[in-house]
Image (spheres, helix red, strand yellow):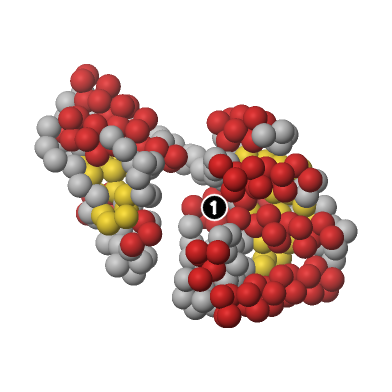
Amino acid sequence: MKVLFVLHEPRMGGATRSLLAALPGLQSHGIEPVFWAPSPGEVVSVLAQRGLRVEGVPRELRYSLRALRQPPGLRARIPATARWLRGLRALIAREAPDVVHANTLLTLPEAVVARRAGVPVVLHVHEMLPGGLRGRGAAALARRVPSAVVTVSKAAAIRLAAHGVPSRAVHNGVEIPPERTPRTAGPDTVVGTLGTISRRKGHDLFVEVARRVRAEQPRVRFRLAGPLAPAPDTTGILASASSVSRRAASALPPARAISPAAMPCSSSSSALRTCAGAIL
């Protein structure tokens, strides 16, 4: 079975990483992957280095007039978006995939293109459906366009169901090591989470877990590492972290104001010990 995976981000974000983590398992079951991704970009480079088939052009698609007006501006974004969607349509015609996998709600426009081309679409929802007009619009498309909708959590599925979108929760997986080395809590025990700090990603729950664990194991340390999401999604998180650690917690600048090159965090395991963030 040939599956065309449509990605929305030029950089290696969480949604793309989780998909690539599942790819070896899919290939072992006979899936032949083809990718359509923003190019140039980190994602295209990583896919090519892994020997995967990938095509793409710049993706300037945005979802509000304000965002469309951001550099390079409306005059550049509108024709670039048309090229992006035409390129996808041409790739579908050339490759004749059995299924198109639209990765995140942000690829709903690409899902529309695929369905109009007569190809079944699986919409993979990695995020919580937003509120307001934007969320209602996304839900309306999600009800009508995809052949199937999968989510990464029951919470996301419940939010979709509230807007009339049936879905199935398929949790992200991690590779389990063959052996687990027994460990006891000590000064070197660090539990960390790396990513944008926000309630949407469950960091308020992470802080509460830290509070409960440290009540019984005070030597265990916790780290929140990453940029701070815009308010109100972060309200109270750093204050709660400070109360757990008994010292002021800080974070990197807001996610919208920081570039990946400027962020001192990386995806390496050592990053949780070294990069800036809130320390509990």
Q: Describe residue 23's horizontal placement relative to residue 263 as left or right.
A: right
Secondary structure of residue under mark 1? helix
- Check the picture and name the quadrant holding the C terminus: top left
* Viewer-proximal residue among 154 and 134: 134
Measured as percent of width and height from the top left, residue 198 is found at 38, 42
Instruction: Tell me what residue is drawn at x 65 percent, y 47 percent.
Output: 138
Q: The residue under label 1 is which amino acid type?
A: Ala
* Viewer-proximal residue among 184 and 203: 203
Measured as percent of width and height from the top left, residue 26 is found at 69, 51
- Check the picture and name the quadrant holding the N terminus: bottom right
The image quarter containing residue 133 is top right
Residue farthest toward the left in the current orientation of the protein? 247
Measured as percent of width and height from the top left, residue 9 is found at 54, 63
Residue 5 seen anywhere in this rendered image of the structure: no
Callout count: 1
Residue 104 seen anywhere in this rendered image of the structure: yes
Measured as percent of width and height from the top left, residue 218 is found at 17, 26
Instruction: Tell me what residue is drawn at x 23 percent, y 54 percent.
Output: 276
* Viewer-proximal residue among 91 and 257: 257
Residue holding disc 1: 15
**Mark 1: few/some/many CA within 10 Å (<14, 14-19, 20+):** some
Residue farthest toward the top in the current orientation of the protein? 216
Instruction: Tell me what residue is drawn at x 51 percent, y 76 percent.
Output: 73
* Viewer-proximal residue among 4 and 198: 198
Instruction: Tell me what residue is drawn at x 79 percent, y 74 percent.
Output: 90
The image quarter containing residue 51 is bottom right
